[in-house]
Image: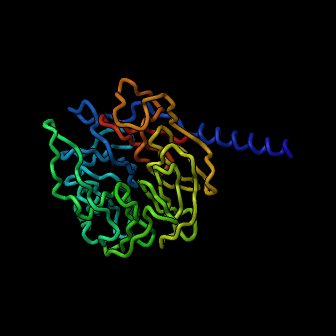
Amino acid sequence: MRKTFLSVLTLAALLANALAAEYKVVPDWLKLPEGRAQLGNQHGDVAVSSKGEVYVSIMDPAAGLMVFSDGGKFLRNVPGAPADFHGFVIHKDADGEFIYGARLGTGNILKLTLEGKEVLNIPSSVIPDEFKNRTPANKKKNAKGEVAKDPNEGKPTVRLTGMDIAPNGDWFVTDGYSSSYVHRFDKTGKYLKSFGGKKPPYSFSTLHKIAVDTRYSPPRIICCDRENLRVVHLSMDGEFLGVYAKDLLAPAAVAVQGDFALIGEIKGDVSIIDKEGKIVAKIGTNTTPGETGNNKTEPAKWRPGFVTAPHGVAFNAHGDIFVSEYSTFGRVHRFNRQ
């Protein structure tokens, strides 16, 4: 029995190593736009269109959503895209391909064409107040030791962090930085329901980003419960189905393709996980103290293939992997599938 058990472990390790070996880092893949010394302050996401163009959100009012070719050449900025797309996806509908994004600052949820034309704009006011947190009192003091009163103190608020679109067109949006609720809308933008939160059976702590997990029938919602170091599954109606993977390095982003889920872990790792919740490979692992889990790691310390604070992940059609960082300088990794 022991020999059999060890053989199983050895086989699993070999399979994990084989899968990891399928991915090769592409150093200096992304070429900066002319005139920019750095990509820009990132606290956002990355997504790939059906044409293979790579969209990256930047905290820059003049360049909130940058578009790069498959080869990494800067192509354009998306006109009118906001500078606070914390989580966004590109989804193909029956009538075309669209950008769906959750705004961290304003709480609006947008549907845009790939050219930046606004199709739908859902204000946070349509979400019932019972599913929102109240803005806490400001406790920060200025240089004179005074505390400025926040005009929003006590008001219901949302801080939306991620979203995805179901096969039937429904929108699922998570309020990761406030209530850890998931809010559901239909394809016309009509509010349907909310579920999740910080109380049992969910007990979420920063439900950061989510994805519709189409590997199952019916589909599920796969959720990065960041501060609980776990990824969980919910039904499309909000039933807690169970823990999918645990003991991760603060899972912050998720994408699904084929048989696998890709998890970006903000404390320095990227995991590839199978349908049964087993980690079958890791890429980009960084164990250097002080380099992970923050947005301050300087470019002088960057090394090809070593992540610092994964905050967005995506696949292209070929299965190549893109990882955007939480970084004041801006960085996007690429790992090509061999």
The answer to whether residue 120 is visible is: no
Q: Residue at the location (65% across, 39% down)?
A: 18
Residue 101, percent from left and from top:
32, 58
Of all residues, the one furthest to the front in this rendering is 145
Asked whether, in this view, residue 108 is left or right of residue 17, the answer is left
Q: What's the image's color scheme?
A: rainbow
Q: Residue at the location (27% across, 48% down)?
A: 65
Q: Residue at the location (24% across, 51% down)?
A: 78
Instruction: Please give the count of numbered marks on the rendered protein.
Output: 0
Residue 122, percent from left and from top:
26, 68
Residue 288, percent from left and from top:
48, 28
- Quadrant in the rendering for residue 266: top left
The answer to whether residue 80 is visible is: yes
Residue 299, percent from left and from top:
35, 27
Of all residues, the one furthest to the top in this rendering is 300
State whether residue 306 is above or below residue 150: above
- Quadrant in the rendering for residue 161: bottom left
Viewer-closest of 312 and 156: 156
Asked whether, in this view, residue 176 is left or right of residue 143, the answer is right
**Looking at the figure, which quarter contains the C terminus?**
top right
